[in-house]
Image (cartoon, rainbow, N blue to C red):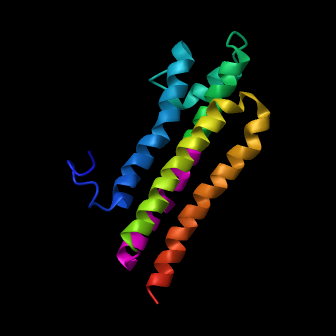
């Protein structure tokens, strides 16, 4: 299948940037969806205020909404550094196999982070794993920059 669309020969790292962007918006859409009528399309940034002060909303749902919004914020905060790292590593001539592995691992870490944070962290015992997965993602971003710098020697 990958050869049909040319992905086997393509540099997957560039494709990973828009995929990371899409992954960043999944928790945003999820939060807005489960918020139901608490989400106001005219004032979307007031959602957290609306759910945190609402006693009629199930506490677990309210907390999931808050964590989903936090996961979205975290993903968008790191996206620029990741995208720039991909460009830097490619521009410096870091090898395609290395870039592909780092990029796919980054996408996996972001998906795992979101799942752990939003769904599994109904049980607080999952918080350390969430932090560990976040660290993995940040190490991948750092690796892109370090490999780019080393390739420019």
Q: Main secondary structure of the magenta part?
A: helix
Whether residue 46 is situated above or below residue 15 in the rendered picture: above
Q: In x, y percent, where is residue 83?
A: 43, 60
Viewer-proximal residue among 125 and 27: 125
Q: In x, y percent, where is residue 133?
A: 64, 50
Residue most toward the bottom?
153
Whether residue 52 is situated above or below residue 138 in the rendered picture: above
Please name the residue shown 57% across and 28% down the image: 46
Q: In x, y percent, where is residue 4?
A: 20, 48
Please name the residue shown 70% across and 49% down the image: 131
**Magenta-highlighted residues:** 73-94
Residue 123 horizontal side relative to residue 43, left or right = right
* Residue 48 on the magenta span: no
Is residue 39 visible to us here?
Answer: no
Is residue 116 visible to us here?
Answer: yes
* Residue 78 on the magenta span: yes
Whether residue 98 is situated above or below residue 137 in the rendered picture: below
Whether residue 70 is situated above or below residue 83 in the rendered picture: above
Please name the residue shown 55% across and 27% down the image: 31
Q: Quadrant of residue 146?
A: bottom right
Residue most toward the left?
4
Q: Quadrant of residue 126?
A: top right
Residue most toward the right?
125
Check the picture and name the quadrant holding the N terminus.
top left
Please name the residue shown 38% across and 60% down the image: 13
Residue 135 horizontal side relative to residue 86, left or right = right
Q: How many numbered marks have been drawn onto this rendered protein structure?
A: 0
Residue most toward the top?
56
Q: In x, y percent, where is residue 132?
A: 70, 51
């Amino acid at each position: 299948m990958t050869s049909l669309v040319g992905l086997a020969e393509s540099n997957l790292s560039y494709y990973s940037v828009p995929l990371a962007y899409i992954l960043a918006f999944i928790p945003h859409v999820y939060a807005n969806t489960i918020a139901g009528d608490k989400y106001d399309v005219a004032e979307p940034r007031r959602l957290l205020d609306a759910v945190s002060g609402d006693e009629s909303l199930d506490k677990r749902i309210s907390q999931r909404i808050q964590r989903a919004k936090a996961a979205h914020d975290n993903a968008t905060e790191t996206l620029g550094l990741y995208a720039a790292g991909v460009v830097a590593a490619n521009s410096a001539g870091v090898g395609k196999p290395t870039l592909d592995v780092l990029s796919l691992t980054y996408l996996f870490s972001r998906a795992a982070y979101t799942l752990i944070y939003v769904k599994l962290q109904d049980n607080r015992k999952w918080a350390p794993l969430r932090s560990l997965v976040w660290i993995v993602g940040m190490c991948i971003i750092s690796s892109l920059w370090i490999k780019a710098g080393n390739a420019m020697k």
